Image (cartoon, helix red, strand yellow):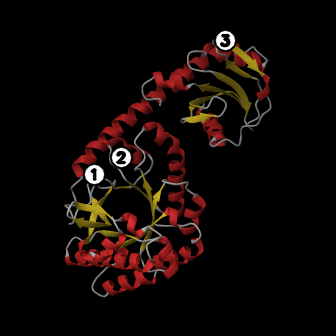
Amino acid sequence: MDPLDVFMNKSKVLPYYQPIVSADNQMVVAYDVLARYEGSEGEESLGWFFHDASIPDEYRLELEDHVQTLALEHYLAGDDHLILCLKYNGVLLAKTNGENVLKRLEFYQEQGLDLTKVIIGIKEEQLDGHLDDLKHVFMYFQSLGIRMSIDDVGLSETNLDRLALLKPNIVKVNLERFHEEAFSQMYQEVHHSLSMLTRKIGATLLFEGISQFNQLNYAWRNGGRYYQGLYLAPPRETFVDRELCKEKLQKDFHHFIVYERKKMEAQLQLTEKANQQLRITLKRIEHMTSYDEMVLAIAQDCDEFAFRVYITDGDGFQQSSNAEKDENGEWKLRGEGRYKNWSWRPYFLENIVRMNYEKRGILSDLYTDIQRDERIRTYAYPIKDNLYVYLDIPYQYLFEQDGLI
């Protein structure tokens, strides 16, 4: 579609409203305002128009004003005053210091608009080169009660420092490209970091672009409080019943919880199996004084579920060689690991303290082993004072058990 055709037929450009649903109460709590062109062949998204730098700024600003004015008038004419999310071009927002948006919002504030019910969203890709200006805009808008969001996080390389600097109220993660489980596994560490960051800066995670059941599950597992996408509800010309998605979400949440419980039970069963085996093995080898002898004995007794075994002290210094299973299934000692320090690993100290307190082993979460380039888990067990054994469990074993992946 030609941009000039769009601009010359502004009367055909209308706001559509896509519901945003809360995990808390499974109710519609907000609407994302989207621009649509209603032509002879049906409605068409105009997202491209507002982000095409070849279109003059004044054209994009005028059409933005048109869509948001219609949306705000529709909003104030109704009774169900939920939250409105208004998209805006970050580059234009920085250039104008947000004056166009603010004038419009202040005009409607005089007619009853509650500014705390407004979210201004810009795309993450538009932050480049405008951080200082946008930081001032964010802070000023937030001081007025307007919430700010950074949208489409995850479609490009995410810089967590920028999010921490701007401190948005909402971080919107786009899942449009997450159709395959293998692809989403590539990013789950990034999204876990995002979840931790948003918690620390007081922001909330919203997952958008949800078009499938597994994407909703992914959003739920990764700390999403709000959800948006075709799987829940498409954009419409009007507002919807707040309970539109309640029954669907409650059923889906039940499936998620049942599945996660099975995973937790499987992890507990593996932990208990390893605990029992280590208790037996350690009694048998308590007379041994060589750490290398100990790791070989432990490895042979735990051959079913381990491919690497080693011993460290409480400061993280490795005291033994690595006992590793070769391609023929034989256990061999590899001395290059001895005296390396592993205290830099995430959760190392926490796990040491937990093992000392609980007097039992701990199973790690899934992570990628650098040497093998595969996802594994590690089981750690306290041998005696200030001495701990670590068993690395291969992906193949985890895959063959229900609930361990």
Q: Is residue 84 above or below residue 293?
A: below
The answer to whether one can see residue 272 in this image is: no
Q: Secondary structure at mark 2?
A: helix
Residue type beneath disc 3:
Glu
x%, y% of residue 87? 39, 69
Residue type beneath disc 2:
Leu
Decide which of tag 1 and tag 3 comes sooner along the chain. 1
* Residue 198 relative to residue 104: left or right: right
The answer to whether one can see residue 382 in this image is: yes
Look at 28% across and 51% down and name the residue there.
232
CB atoms of marks 1 and 3 within 8 Å: no
Q: Secondary structure at mark 3?
A: loop
Tag 3 residue: 330
CB atoms of marks 2 and 1 within 8 Å: yes
Quadrant in the rendering for residue 164: bottom right
Residue 156 vs residue 266, the one in the foreground = 156
Look at 22% across and 48% down and name the residue there.
247
- State the CA–CA distance, disc 1 to disc 3: 52 Å
Residue 31 vs residue 3, the one in the foreground = 3
Tag 1 residue: 232
Residue 278 vs residue 405, the one in the foreground = 405
x%, y% of residue 64? 36, 75
Residue type beneath disc 1:
Leu
- State the CA–CA distance, disc 2 to disc 3: 43 Å
Q: Is residue 143 above or below residue 261?
A: below
Q: Judge the density around disc 2: few (<14), some (14-19), many (≥20) Cα neighbours within 10 Å.
A: many
Decide which of tag 2 and tag 3 comes sooner along the chain. 2
Decide which of tag 2 and tag 1 comes sooner along the chain. 2
Tag 2 residue: 216
- State the CA–CA distance, disc 2 to disc 1: 9 Å
